[in-house]
Image: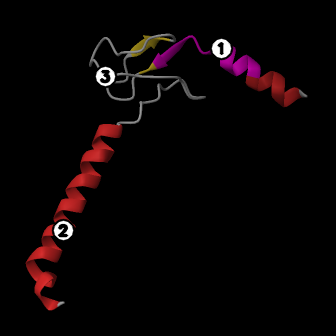
């Protein structure tokens, strides 16, 4: 029972969050850093803001690797079959 109260008071004690890029202090409900302009989300237990997942970068990386592997197959293994 004491652990729950301790966690609850720690969450209530956090009034500011820190930007993960530039470490600027932000309001707890801020969605964008006023200093560097990146988007931020919730806050972890240490008061540092969480970054959103960059799905565009994951998609681009997947497509780039797929194109590279397709080129390797076309350049070296297509005629072996």
Secondary structure under badge 1?
helix
Task: Find residue 31 and report its horizontal and vertical position in percent.
Answer: 41, 15
Instruction: Please report the residue visible at 56 percent of the width from the left and 28 percent of the height from the top.
Output: 46
Q: Secondary structure at mark 3?
A: loop
At a point 49% along the width and 26% down the height, the residue shown is 48
Report the residue marked by disc 2: 70
Residue 33 on image: x %, y %: 34, 16
Q: How far apart, in angstroms, are the residues tagged by discs 3 and 2? A: 35 Å
Could you say which is closer to the camera, residue 46 or residue 49?
49
> Residue 23, image x and y in percent?
37, 23
Q: Assign the N terminus to one quadrant of the image.
A: top right
Residue 69, relative to residue 61: is it above or below? below
- Marks 1, 2: nearer the viewer: 2
Q: Which residues are magenta?
A: 8-17
- For mark 1, what is the residue? 13
Residue 72 in magenta stretch: no
Cα separation, mark 1 vs mark 2, equals: 53 Å
> Around disc 2, counting alpha carbons within 10 Å, would you say few (fewer than 14), some (14 to 19), or many (20 or more)?
few
What residue is shown at x 47% (from left), y 29% (from top)? 50
Q: Is residue 17 above or below residue 67?
A: above
């Amino acid at each position: 029972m004491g652990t729950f109260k301790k966690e609850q008071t720690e969450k209530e004690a956090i009034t500011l969050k820190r930007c993960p890029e530039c470490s600027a202090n932000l309001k707890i409900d801020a969605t964008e850093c006023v200093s560097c302009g990146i988007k931020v989300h919730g806050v972890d237990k240490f008061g540092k803001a969480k970054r959103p997942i960059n799905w565009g970068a994951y998609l681009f990386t997947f497509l780039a690797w797929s194109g590279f592997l397709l080129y390797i197959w076309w350049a070296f293994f297509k005629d072996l079959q």
